[in-house]
Amino acid sequence: MTTYTRWLIIFSATMTGCFFVASSGGFRGLVKYDSSYLGLVIFILALAATFYMGKICGEIDDYIKDIKYKQIPNFKESILKKIGIVRYVAESCFDLGLLSTIIGLVMMFLGMGSDVLSLITTIKNALSTAFIPTLVGMIANLVLRLQMFIAEHAIED
């Protein structure tokens, strides 16, 4: 099985998961309840990095199949540098998710009033801002790391 095919399977499974999340209203909640919009930023970054990984996997397959690519000096190093860019994005997705946790907790402490109803509303909104992007960042990190693992494994063989 080619590296690109493996990437395509992961991409298809991820998009199927996104479809089920969207059909249950998950993306609407991502925009509605995340006042920092970091969850949306994380999702867009992860999607762009996923497409870039697909391009990298295609280049790896070309390298494996075609003799003329094997004559390119430092091909493996250039692929590993490209994978390094995706690694940085994956770590950034995770870090942005953690940042949203801090932002949500700060919003919770700054917005506390004396009224019980406003306190409950503030806590609900702040925790949504805190945890929804964190979840998106963790999932994005896991998917991108799996894609990087497959690409790195293929280039080392």
Image (tube, rainbow, N blue to C red):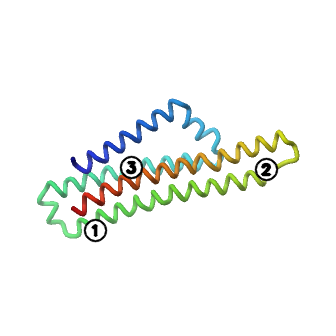
Kindly identify which numbered label has been placed on residue 93.
none
Residue at screen point 65% across, 44% down: 128
Give the residue number, with chain letter if any, for mark 3.
Answer: 50
Residue 56 appears in which quarter of the rendering? bottom left
Residue neighbourhood size for the residue with mark 2, other residues' Cα within 10 Å, grouped as few (<14), some (14–19), many (≥20): some
Q: Seen in the image, is 98 located left or right of residue 105?
A: left
**Residue 138 point in image, percent of width and height:** 51, 52
Q: Secondary structure at mark 3?
A: helix
**Which comes before the other along the chain, label 2 or label 1?**
1
| Image vertical order of residue 44 relative to residue 17, above or below | below
Q: Amino acid at mark 3?
A: Thr
What type is the residue that disc 1 sits on?
Glu
Image quadrant occupied by the C terminus: bottom left
Which residue is rendered at x = 36% and y = 48% of the image? 51
Residue located beneath label 2 in the image = 111
Q: Which residue is mark 1?
A: 77
In this rendered view, identify the residue nearer to me: 134 or 43. 134
Within 10 Å of the Cα at label 3, are there few (<14), some (14-19), or many (20+) other Cα atoms?
many
Chain-order first, disc 1 or disc 3: 3
